[in-house]
Amino acid sequence: MVMFKKKCGRCKKNYVPATNKTGFVICYECQEKQMQGEIKDPEMKKMFDIPKEFYEASMFLRDIKIKYLQFGSLSERQIEAFRNTVERFKEEKNDTPQ
Ligand SMILES: [Zn+2]
């Protein structure tokens, strides 16, 4: 897959990592405000408690968090996808020599 950067569709200022399959992109800065909010469910709180850099790198992770804050719940499938994505990020991080 070809990785490149696409300009944010909202601020048209920042670049977002994207693949040739990525459509509309929004940068972290533009979504940051939407991602603020209190999460009461301890399990969800734990799930969303991941390094900021993961959110910065993945529009998908941001989307899920925003959806959760908006609707107060997620489907099993969304939770699973979120966890898988976080796992992948962790693995990639471990592979990188320090
Ligand atoms: Zn932006």
Image: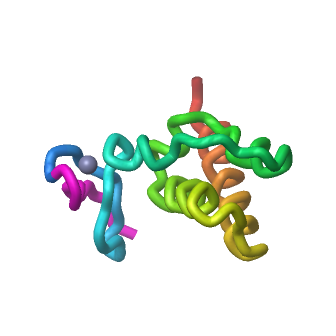
Placement of the N terminus among the 4 image quadrants = bottom left
59 vs 54, left or right, is left
Is residue 53 one of those drawn in magenta? Answer: no
Counting the numbered discs, the total is: 0
- What colouring does the structure picture have? rainbow
Quarter holding the C terminus?
top right
Q: Is residue 50 above or below residue 72?
A: above
Where residue 52 appears, as percent x and y from the top left, is 54, 35
Q: Indicate yes or no whether the magenta region holds residue 7.
A: yes
**Residue appearing at x 51%, y 54% in the figure:** 62
What's drawn in magenta, residue-wise? 1-11
Q: Quadrant of residue 65?
A: bottom right
Image-quadrant location for residue 2: bottom left
Task: Decide if residue 2 is on the left or right side of residue 32.
Answer: left
Residue drawn at the location 66% of the way across and 39% of the way down: 50
Front residue of 55/1: it is 55
User: x, y percentage for residue 85?
Assistant: 64, 58
* Residue at the outermost top position: 98
Compared across the picture, whether 44 is left or right of 12 comes to right
In the image as oriented, which residue stretches furthest toward the left? Answer: 12
Please state the horizontal and vertical placement of residue 46, each as a whole percent of the image.
Answer: 78, 42
Q: Is residue 2 above or below residue 47?
A: below
Looking at the image, which is closer to me, 2 or 41?
41
Find residue 42 and report its horizontal and vertical position in percent: 84, 44
Q: Residue at x 53, y 41 (%)?
A: 36
Question: Is 53 positioned to the left or the right of 15 in the image?
Answer: right
